[in-house]
Every structure is written in C-alpha cells, then in structure tokens.
Amino acid sequence: MQDAPTANELLGAIAAFIRDHAMPQLQGHTAFHARVAANAIDIIRRELDIAPAANVAEQARLEALLDAKGTLDALNRQLCARIAEGSITLDTPGLADHLWATTMTKVAIDQPNYSAYRRSLEEGVQPG
C-alpha cells in the first residue's frame, strides 16, 4: 500500500495548479495547451478510478456473451470478428446491453459532462 498522497491526489494537485495558477498567467496558444493538459490529467484520474472495476465487468460480460475465456483485449477482438462475420448481431441476447454498458463507461471516463450521458444518468442508466 502506498502512503498518501495517492497517484490520483497528485494528479489532482497538478491539474489544480495548472488551472488555478499557471493558466491565469498564460495567453493564447500556451493557455490552450495548458487547458488541454489539465483536461488530460482529469481523464487519467477518472480512468484510474473507473477503469479497473469497469474492465472486470466488461470481461465478465464478454465471457458470458461469447462463451469464452480470455484477456479483455482478446475477447474484444473476438467480439469484433463475430460481429463482422454476422454470427453475433444486435438480436443476440446481451449484446446491446454490453455495448451500452461499455459505451457508458467510456463516456464516464472521457466526457462525463456530455449532455446525452448526463441525461442517461438522470434516467437511471448507470455506467458499466
């Protein structure tokens, strides 16, 4: 176990420094790049928080859907191949739910303020 501060806390401090101290001193293109850096750090923080459990859940859904074992990457490649060959379609039980859950998780990490994502959360749809 690591002592405080955690990696996520350190990343939060860096993002806060960029936003609160560096960006007000910057202009133009440099300010834009600082904002991009702070946003990238926020994405990394969300991925650290969300991805471990989401990846386990995604792998379990894929194993059930494909009736196969494997790494998350291998299972995703197998799903793509089966969709491409037509042996799995949106009519396949579990596929639409899997795709929706996976998409919700990806949006939760990348764009949690996306309006359609927010609306889905308000409607009770949860990521992963």
Image (tube, grey):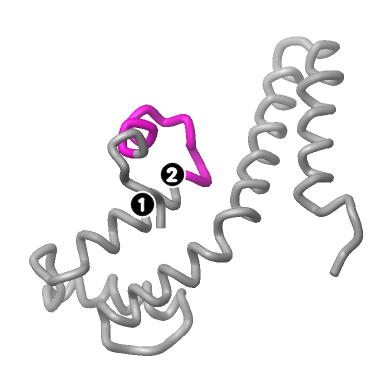
- Identify whether 14 is placed above or below 85: above
- Identify whether 66 is placed above or below 103: below
Q: In the figure, is residue 4 to the left or right of 75?
A: right
Q: In the figure, residue 99 lies in which quadrant?
A: bottom left
- Pick the quarter of the image with the N terminus: bottom right
The amino acid type, in three-letter code, at marker 2 is: Val
Element on which disc 1 rests: helix
Q: Residues within 10 Å of mark 2 (few under 14, many from 20)?
A: some
Marker disc for residue 41: none
The magenta stretch spans residue 118? yes
Is disc 1 in contact with disc 2, using a CB cutoff of under 8 Å?
A: yes
Element on which disc 2 rests: helix
| Residue occupying image coordinates x 43% and y 86% | 70
Q: In the figure, residue 95 lies in which quadrant?
A: bottom left
Q: Position of residue 18 (x, y in %)?
A: 80, 26
Structural distance between the alpha carbons of marks 1 and 2: 6 Å
Marker disc for residue 107: 2
| Residue occupying image coordinates x 49% and y 62% | 54
Q: In the figure, residue 51 lies in which quadrant?
A: bottom right
Marker disc for residue 103: 1
| Residue occupying image coordinates x 26% and y 76% | 81
| Residue occupying image coordinates x 43% and y 44% | 107
- Identify whether 68 is placed above or below 65: below
Magenta range: 108-120
Q: In the figure, is residue 30 to the left or right of 3?
A: left
Q: In the figure, is residue 79 to the left or right of 107?
A: left
Residue situated in front as seen by the camera: 89 or 46: 46
- Pick the quarter of the image with the C terminus: bottom left
